[in-house]
Amino acid sequence: MNLYNLTKNKLAQLKEKPFKLEREIQHFFEQNMLEITGLKLVKSEFVIKGKRIDTLAFDNQANAFVIIEYKRDKNVSVVDQGFTYLSLMLENKADFVLTYNETLTKSLHSTKVDWSQTRVIFVSPSFTENQRLATNFKDIAIELWEIKRFENDIISISPIKKTRAAESIKAITQQDSKIKSVTAEIRVYSEEEHLQGKSDDTVELYHTFKNAILNLKDDLDIKPKKQEIGFTNSGKIFADVCILKNSLKFWINLKKGQLDDPKKMSRDVTSIGHWGNGDYEIVTNDTNNIEYILFLIKQAL
């Protein structure tokens, strides 16, 4: 992706200023963890069983740990390393929970962690075609994020999308015991699962809203989770939807007091238990107010 600076109607291409060290990328990510990913930083340089995890983070909405690794070496197999770390976590759950509690001074219990939503994120200035193909499975708990730095302190962060034709990794799990054990416990949820058993009207309503939301801006995507589907902007969730029997329930990822809602269509769920991100909830069973709902959701972008 080329970036340009516009001055008096003249375009000047911004030159890339590559990160010299993995540590530079790691420091930047950890200092801006919540803003970039929506995740909570737990510990940097977490060592367990002789292996070093660059960054250990926690997804408060999914109640799951996330491992983040930073790469400049293009010859590394991200799949092998990713499954090694996932296996390491599942075999040492108590150590991860203990580290969370000691570092953040919390009292998280292992039974409250949704280990099925554990995932690994690899962050690199670029990935090879082989690395992209190796992770292009719709149900693999490994994500690739590209980060580039340009002059004028411009940073570009782009999670790599899986292709629509991505197959299931289950076809090859029987060939690798480590992958088999990990995929037996970790789930990557799909859009199809959320739509299963819903009426044709509800499915059509969902697709109408989904397409409208994804058209609000370039490069938006969806991220199916256990209870809801997240809408992401550069990997960070800005809204969620839960597909109910006859309606859709949206959450807008803004804090209380940040949403401009003159029609008072949203509900404040600040102190109410809910699945999605943010403090605002909207329920709809038709498209009568779709333009207004899009106006509300767009404020989180």
Image (tube, rainbow, N blue to C red):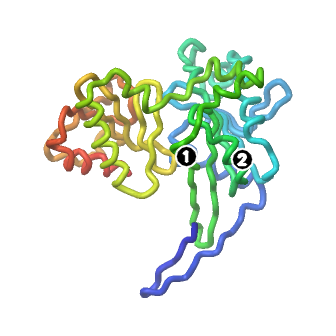
Disc 1 to disc 2, C-alpha distance: 14 Å
Residue 291 position, x and y percent, is 20, 50
Alpha-carbon neighbours of circle 2 within 10 Å: few (<14), some, or many (≥20)? some
Seen at 21% across and 33% down, the residue is 284
Seen at 57% across and 24% down, the residue is 187
Residue 28's label in the rendered image is: none
Q: Secondary structure at mark 2?
A: helix
Residue 163's label in the rendered image is: 1
Give the number of callouts. 2
Residue 40 position, x and y percent, is 56, 36
Residue 34 position, x and y percent, is 53, 43
Residue flagged by tag 1: what amino acid is it? Thr
Figure check: 237 above or below 87: below
Q: Mark 1 against mark 2, which lies toward the viewer?
A: 1
Can residue 88 be seen in this snapshot?
Answer: no
Figure check: 203 above or below 215: above
Q: Secondary structure at mark 1?
A: loop
Seen at 62% across and 18% down, the residue is 185
- Which numbered disc, 1 or 2, marks the residue that appears first in the sequence? 2
Can residue 70 be seen in this snapshot?
Answer: yes
The residue carrying mark 2 is 131
Q: Nearer the viewer, residue 193 or 47?
A: 193
